[in-house]
Each structure stands twice: as C-alpha cells, then as structure tokens.
Amino acid sequence: MGHNHSHHHHHHDHRDVKGRNLLISIFLNILITVAQVIGGIISGSLSLLSDALHNFSDVLSLIISYVANRFAKKKASFKRTFGYKRAEIIAAFVNAATLLVVAVYLVYEAILRFISPQEIETGLVIWLAILAILANGFSVLLLRKSSRENMNMRSAYLHLITDMSASVAVLVGGLLMKYFGWFWVDSLLTILIAVYLIIMGTGLLRSSFRVLMLFTPEDVDLKEIRNSISTHSEIKNVHHMHIWQLNEQETHLEAHIDFHRDITLSEFDAILNDVETILSDQYGINHVNIQPEYQKDDPKDIIVQD
C-alpha cells in the first residue's frame, strides 16, 4: 500500500498570533459586555441590554474558537493519530449554529421593539455604542487576516462583525432617537443585521458540516481526477475512491488502482510518484493512499460503499 505525506506546515508563530489575537478580543468583549449591562440598566435601554447579551454570546464563541485553536496545535499520538485537527472545524460549526440562533433572536427583539418603541436615555446609549464600536472594530482588524484561511477564525470574525454592526445600529438608533424621535430605526437596523448574519452563518454552517461529514470537497471532481490518473499507460482502472478534508489545509485521497500487468514494487513506487504529483499540482490533494491491485476480484466502481 503506497502512502505519502506532503505536509504544508504553518509556522507556529502564525498559530500563536491567532491565539493571542483571540485572547485580546475575548478580554475586550468581556469589558464591553459589563459596560453595556450596567449602562442598559441605568438608561433603561433594551437595545443596549440585548447588545450586551449579544456580546456575551460573542465572548462564549471566542472562547470556543480559542480552545479549538489551542487543541489544533496538539501533537498526534497513538490514541489520536490525527491529533485534534478537526477541533477548529467543530468550533466553526458550533459558532455558525449560534450565529443563526442569535440572528433569529435579534429579529424577534426587533419586532417586539417595533410594536412598542421604548423611551430611552439616549446619551449613555450613544457613548456606550461608540465604546463597543471601537473595541469590536479593533478585534475585527486583529482577526481579519486569519479569517480568510481558517473556518474557525472566520466564525469568530463573523461574530465580531455582527457585534460591531449591532453597535453601529445602536449608535445610529441613539442619534436618530435623540434628535428626531425615530424609535423605529433601531428595529429596522437590527433586522438588516440579522439578515446579513443568517446569510453568512448558513454558508459557514454548510461548509463546516461538509468537512465533518467527510463529503468530497466542493471544488473537486472525482470523475475528472480518475480520468487524470488513468492516463498513465500502466494503469488499467481507478476505483473505490474516497476524497475528504481533514481540515482546511489537508485533503486526503484513497483509491484502489488496478494495473495491466504484475508490476514490481519499485515500478509501483515510480508510478505512485507520478500520481502524487498530478494530485498535488492539479487538485491540491496532499495526502495520498493507494492500494495497488492486479486481477483482483473486487467491484471496479468509482464509488464503493464500504
């Protein structure tokens, strides 16, 4: 059985920067939450209290992301041969699910507020909203870069972006209430934020679910890969294929390859090298596991249910 690893190691300092940025964001969000709870109680602002609750859900999601980030760094062992590489995908899934729950709750709150607008002590609301925008804006900038390449960081980043938008809504609402008495603006902005959240959260939930369920990655075409490998003169048939992602950096392929003749082991190694190069260069598959066969009596379908 041929097996190959061509690892793409990310430097540890990159990982540590992610962890540090998450920690800073956690502390900033705890600070905002406490300030908003106190401010909400003093001013009687429901929007501030619901924003505080929202921020608290953020603190929890950031803690989940942080713990997953720490776990993902743990080394593989005899009992855990893949280490904890899936931890960040699970965190992304949990956080995406909570994003959707928060979004539905925001809509509910907004409708209630729409029906019965409340008089609010606007001065305090405006200042606390500005504090929240600054703190969340800083956190968003910290996580922005790593959110592009990592699902877990993207889920944390989305929580923070929503939070910042919610605080902007609170600020705009506070200003419009203070100068124009337009109490309905608060509700309208909240619903818009919730809709954005549902769209982003659904996408993240779907992509993390696909990885957890070992589905074939969306940008990979099994038949096309089979055809690419089958162009090799010695290969008769490629079957029993599985392609899945361990996490966003690692894509695995396993397959049975039927050969025209009874080749030697050294010939197989040379062919395996060719196959690995095609898979790595054209499809970004970096873990390949091939079972060589010659006149073996087994199903030759591209997909075989184990």
Image (tube, rainbow, N blue to C red):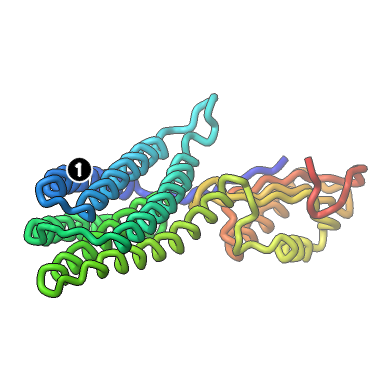
User: Which is nearer the eye, 173 or 265?
Assistant: 173
SS at mark 1 in the image: helix
| Label 1 packing within 10 angstroms: few (<14), some (14-19), many (20+) | some
Q: Residue furthest left?
A: 123
Q: Residue furthest bottom?
A: 180
Check the image and report above or below for 86 versus 226: above
The quarter of the image holding the N terminus is: top right
Q: Residue at x 49, y 58 (%)?
A: 202
Q: Quadrant of residue 221?
A: bottom right
Q: Residue at x 53, y 36 (%)?
A: 82
Check the image and report above or below for 206 versus 289: below
Q: Tag 1: residue type?
A: Ile
Residue 13 visible somewhere in the drawing: no
Q: Please state the horizontal and vertical placement of residue 73, each as a whole percent of the image.
A: 39, 38
Q: Residue at x 32, y 45 (%)?
A: 57
Q: Residue at x 35, y 48 (%)?
A: 11
Left or right for 170, reference 63: left
Q: Please state the horizontal and vertical placement of residue 154, each as a whole percent of the image.
A: 38, 55
Residue 281 visible somewhere in the drawing: yes
Q: Quadrant of residue 292?
A: top right
Check the image and report above or below for 72 versus 80: below
Q: Residue furthest front?
A: 116
The quarter of the image holding the C terminus is: top right
Q: Please state the horizontal and vertical placement of residue 5, each as a whole percent of the image.
A: 57, 46
Q: Residue furthest top?
A: 79
Residue where numbered disc 1 is placed: 30
